Amino acid sequence: MNSRIAKLLALACFSAAFSQSPASAADALVLMTDFGTSDGAVSAMRGVAYGVDPKLSVSDLTHQIPDYDIWLGAYRLYQTANYWPQGSVFVSVVDPGVGTSRKSVVLKTRGGRYFVGPDNGLFTLIAERDGVAELREIDEKVNRLAGSAESYTFHGRDVYAYVGARLASGQISYQQVGPQLPVEAVVKLDYQKPARQGNVLRGIIPVLDEKYGNVWTNIPKSLLDELNVGVGDQVQVRILHKGKQVGKYVAPFHHTFGGVPKGQPLVYLNSLLEVAVAISQGSFAAKHHVGSGLDWQVELSKPGK
């Protein structure tokens, strides 16, 4: 074989190796729970996933969801999922009803991401924002860790990590997860949607910026734009808990924390382009005793309006 033929054969082999379909590679597996990391629960889930396929890429979204807080779990998925590639599989376990009649499902969004977990409202915000392409109930007779049939309180390990790993690794197709459910059947939490009423914007405080104490709302930039708020304009912020006012503040709107002096309040758009309230280099939530969740409301308006 002359050198020219040998080079052509080598080039052909090189090209074939890099022209394989990306679908042959495992998709990312992302874990989120309210388990914490002080015991072995998360490690057991990882062990199950690697037992399915040692080559899997397993990452953690968070394991610090407060105990049984389905809403915060739903929000952390909403905050994070769209920054992961199409095909990523999210195993999400905030499951106070583990072992009861609540369904175990895999939801596929229109963007091609998969969400494995209990159908208890955990997928509320994902379903609303990204749309549900399909919903399937997990058939635990065939999709369950071997030897776990008598375990009733650790579906995160026995069902969800196992199914998520098999799906991410390509060992099962989505159709093999189990029977199809109507897409509208996904359980959704009831919460106050952002809305404009005259010159007032209303919403909730879904979460706090845990590290810095900034107060996030679910009011999007598009609604704020309807009030014609520009940089430096004053915004009136009214905060309510269970319908009762706990604080009323006026602060300027700025793009960055540096727009006001240290220790001064401001209104800004957070990383999700939703309205938030902060103190430059301080904690607005701690100073004003503000919490978060479905019973914390917020109203925004221009002063005097």
Image (cartoon, grey):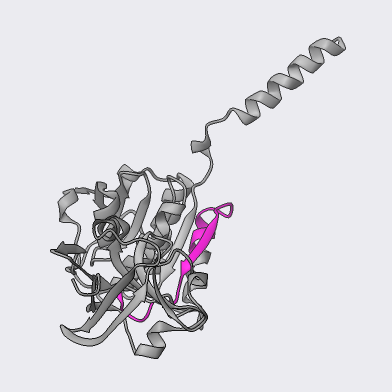
Residue 95 visible (yes or no):
no
Left or right of 100? Residue 160 is: right
Left or right of 4? Residue 24 is: left
- Between 87 and 127, the one lying in front of the other is 127
Please say if 242 is above or below 151: below
Residue drawn 51% across and 78% down?
A: 261
Residue drawn 50% across and 55% down?
A: 52
- Between 205 and 230, the one lying in front of the other is 230
Q: Quadrant of residue 206?
A: bottom left
Q: Which residues are magenta?
A: 48-69
Q: Is residue 55 magenta?
A: yes
- Between 62 and 140, the one lying in front of the other is 62
Q: Position of residue 55 (x, y in %)?
A: 58, 52
Q: Position of residue 36 (x, y in %)?
A: 46, 79
In this view, the residue farthest toward the left is 198
Quadrant that contains the C terminus: bottom left
Quadrant that contains the N terminus: top right
Q: Quadrant of residue 197?
A: bottom left
Residue drawn 29% across and 56% down?
A: 225
Residue drawn 45% across and 84% down?
A: 283
- Between 178 and 34, the one lying in front of the other is 34
Residue 221 visible (yes or no):
yes
Q: Position of residue 57 (x, y in %)?
A: 55, 55
Left or right of 7? Residue 20 is: left
Left or right of 94? Residue 49 is: right
Q: Quadrant of residue 246?
A: bottom left
Q: Is residue 1 magenta?
A: no
